Amino acid sequence: MANPLRDFFLGTISGQQTPKKELTDALTPRRSFADVILPASTRQQLEYALVQIKKSDLIFGTWGLGERHATGLGLAFNFAGPPGTGKTICAEAVAFEIGKRLLIVRYAEMESLWAGETSKNVTAVFRLAQETDAVLFFDEADAIASRRFGSVTQGYQREANAVVNVLLKELEEFDGVVIFATNLASNFDPAFERRIRTHILFEMPDAPAREEIWKVQLHARKTPLADDVDFKTLAEKYNVAGGDIKNAVLKAAQIASTENVPDAQKQIHQRHFLAGIEEVLKSKTVMEQSIVDGDGSNRGPMDAGTMSQISTAFTQLATNQSAMGEDLRTLGERSEAIEGQFSALPELFQNWEAAQNAARLELHDELAGQIEKSSSHALELRTDFARVDERIHSALAQTKIALIIAVLGVLVGIGGIVAALVVR
Ligand SMILES: Nc1ncnc2c1ncn2[C@@H]1O[C@H](COP(=O)(O)OP(=O)(O)OP(=O)(O)O)[C@@H](O)[C@H]1O
Ligand SMILES: [Mg+2]
């Protein structure tokens, strides 16, 4: 029995490793489809499931699709139907057909009081199935794959949602065979349903099927059957599931074994089977009544009025449940849509960052162009300045020469005047 408190103290405080909890039961399958009586449609669906499993190596290996797609390569099946209709035995038969072991998940060990621990356990069982190449089997899977809570106000809701999220992720990444079995498929999370390749419905057996199921519960050679045994009558009289028939056969054998005759003469008679099935039905009624009546005290005969009130209450309950189911479905879908938007966010951020980088590069290029252009303008300006400077210099030089010539001219003129005066 799981004891998180003990695990915590032994594992953490004393610093010792707690013994690893067994999260699964590994079963070497012995029962095959030859042991199961099923309607043609269910059998056909199971055969198709087997073909899918057997051909997955061809599709993902030889045809290379496994290299093109990293996720969604696994094969997940859901066996849904009322109790005792053969879901568990068929999971075993699938594993038997493909020659693998069946890894049956143990919920009692998976569930942990510690936040995040159950999710880790979910991951661990998928790893184990991968490593041991086994068929992973979640029996009564609605316990773990139920709808996520739309609005989370309590810790347990957050934890349950986290477990479903991890289950979805693992399912996406797992490339083996997973089988879920449930009595309440309508309780499944919609996102979870979509990741399941095939849903196979297990129906209550009809009379001819029940007759075969009665027969298949016995050993073909060793079980001593009396001549008065008539399975057809039993099948027609009792509209029950295979699980009930199995229990009835075991009870019949027990009753027959206690008869007051030597063992070698003991046989199972029709009366034993009748007593067996009646006992099964009686214990089922007791179970149902104890659910309805609480502790079972103060129980008296029920009148027609009370019966009708109860029936109305049940109808109302069913209506409410289906309305609630719709609400939950909408909520589930909404939360999925939001989740989708959230998951798109990283890509948006990435795109945004890429756009920013592109804009930055563009701006950078443009600025560099402008700077280059400005510097070539500056160069041209400097050349112009130099040219003007040169011109100014040459103009100044010319002016200087002109001035010298003018001064010389003046001096020559003065000299001429002076010479003329002297001659006179
Ligand atoms: N269709 C069937 N053919 C032969 N045997 C059956 C069939 N259905 C049930 N049985 C017998 O009943 C037993 C119980 O069936 P099983 O455990 O497969 O039912 P289940 O659908 O898994 O029930 P639950 O929902 O209660 O887990 C089987 O071991 C088998 O002996
Ligand atoms: Mg079962």
Image (spheres, rainbow, N blue to C red):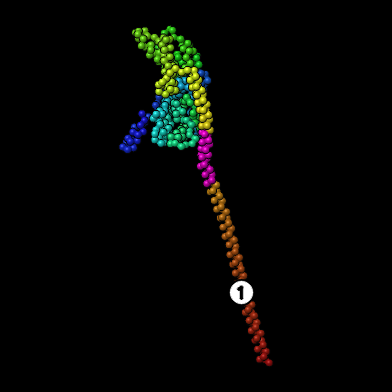
Q: Is residue 362 visible?
A: yes
Residue at the bottom extreme, as displayed? 424
Q: Is residue 392 left or right of residue 143?
A: right
Residue drawn at x 48%, y 26% as measured from the top left: 184
Q: Residues within 10 Å of mark 1 (few under 14, many from 20)?
A: few
Q: Position of residue 43 (x, y in %)?
A: 50, 20
Q: Amino acid at mark 1?
A: Leu
Q: Residue 405, position in %: x, y?
A: 64, 79
- Residue 110 placement (x, y as % from top left): 40, 31
Vertical placement of residue 356 versus 258, above or below: below
Reply above or below: 6 against 202: below
Q: Residue at x 53, y 43 (%)?
A: 348
Query: For the point 66% across and 91% down, which residue is it?
Result: 422
In the image, 86 versus 143, the foreground residue is 143
Provide the secondary structure element on which disc 1 rests.
helix
The magenta-colored residue range is 331-353
Q: How many marks?
A: 1
The correct choice, above or below, for 126 with respect to 382 in the image is above
* Residue 19 locus on image (x, y percent): 34, 32
Residue that carries the numbered disc 1 in the rendered image: 396
Q: Along the line of sight, which residue is nearer the eye, 199 or 1?
A: 1
Magenta includes 183?
A: no
Whether residue 198 appears in this view of the structure is no
Q: Under 8 Å from ligand 2: the CB of mark 1?
A: no
User: Does the magenta stretch mainly form a helix, a strand or a loop?
Assistant: helix
